[in-house]
Image (cartoon, grey):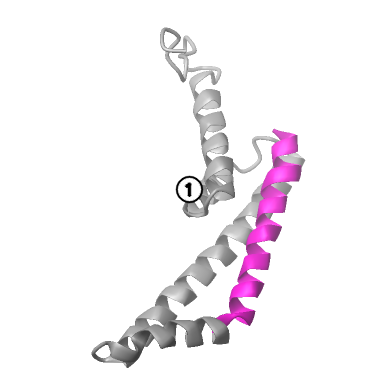
Amino acid sequence: MKALGICCWIGYGIFRLGMVVAAVLLLPTATVMFGALLSRVANPFAWMDVFHLLYAGCTILAFICGLLGIMSGAGLLRSPASKPGLLLAASLLSLSDLPVGIALSVYTLTFFVRSQSTSPGAGEPQPAIRKDIS
């Protein structure tokens, strides 16, 4: 799980923060490109406002995912079970990013499902995947 923290979550967090910087720098270009599509629609200013709202929402989501990814990776470096809530939040929010976010999130969520099913004190460990299928 330490390699997952070093290579994947910290790298993914840096990647998402880089996406935020690119989104902020390319905002004028994206506005012009979207504005070119609005020449024949009714009330183009309302649609431009919707575009800016969605663009800001995606940028904020990328920023939050980047911060959570870096903090989760740093937490995994300290100890694998240091902050599982933070890692689960990062995993769930990163499901919206294709393809890296989905792959990393599904792997992390699968790891947590398997570790929860074999946790001590839970009695007999239950398999996370049925044995007769695999």
Percent of width and height locating residue 65: 57, 58
Q: Nearer the viewer, residue 73 or 100?
A: 100
Badge 1: residue crowd in 10 Å (few <14, some 14–19, many ≥20)? some
Q: Residue at x 69, y 38 (%)?
A: 4
In the image, taking residue 4 as reference, residue 33 lies left or right, namely left
Q: Along the horizontal axis of the image, is 44 left or right of 60?
A: left
Q: Residue at x 42, y 14 (%)?
A: 130
Q: Could you tell me which secondary element the residue under label 1 belongs to?
A: helix
Q: Main secondary structure of the magenta part?
A: helix
- Is 111 within the magenta? no
| Count of numbered labels shown in the rendering | 1
The amino acid sitting under disc 1 is Leu
**Quarter of the image where the N terminus is located:** top right
User: According to the image, label 1 marks what residue?
Assistant: 92
Q: Residue at x 76, y 44 (%)?
A: 6
| The magenta segment | 1-27
Give the x, y percent position of residue 37.
38, 83
Q: Position of residue 41 (x, y in %)?
A: 27, 87
Q: Position of residue 43 (x, y in %)?
A: 26, 91
